[in-house]
Image (cartoon, grey):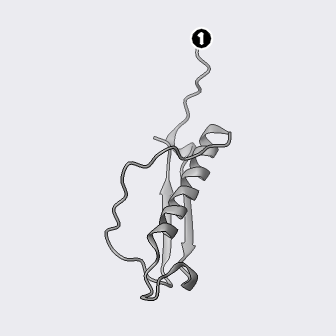
Amino acid sequence: MSNIIEKPVSDSRTTMTELMIPSYANFGGKIHGGILLSLMDKVAYACSSKHAGAYCVTVSVDKVNFLQPVEVGELISLHAAVN
C-alpha cells in the first residue's frame, strides 16, 4: 500500500514579487543573472517545501535562457507550481 497523497497543482502554486534594486545591478543598470537565478531558487524552495511539507533543495537545473535584460526599478514576479 502506497503512502503517496495526490495534491492538486493549486496546493503548491506560489508567486513571489520583488523590486529590482541598484545593489542587484551591474554598472549599466542591468540586473545580474545570478540574482535572478537566486530568486528562482527561492520561489522553487517555497513551492516545493509547501508541497512536500518538508525541507527541500534544488538538485539540478537543466537550462535557463535570459531573453531580455531586467532593469533597476522593475518588479519581477516569479511563479512556481508542482505539476
Q: With respect to residue 7, does 47 lie above or below? A: below
Relative to the observer, which residue lies in front, 27 or 54? 27
Q: Tag 1, which secondary structure?
A: loop
Residue 28, quarter of the rendered image: bottom left
Residue 5, quarter of the rendered image: top right
**Residue type marked 1:** Met
Please state, as top left, top right, bottom left or bottom right, where the C terminus lies in the image: top left
Residue at image point 42% right, 77% down: 70
Residue 56 shown left or right of residue 31 in the figure: right
Q: Position of residue 75 (x, y in %)?
A: 50, 76
Q: Position of residue 19 (x, y in %)?
A: 55, 77
Q: Which residue corresponds to mark 1?
A: 1
Residue at image point 50% right, 59% down: 40
Residue at image point 48% right, 80% down: 74
Q: Position of residue 21 (x, y in %)?
A: 56, 82
Please state, as top left, top right, bottom left or bottom right, where the N terminus lies in the image: top right
Q: Residue furthest top?
A: 1
**Crowd rating for badge 1 (residues with CA inside 10 Å; few <14, some 14–19, many 20+):** few
Q: With respect to residue 62, does 23 lie above or below? A: below
Q: Position of residue 64 (x, y in %)?
A: 37, 58
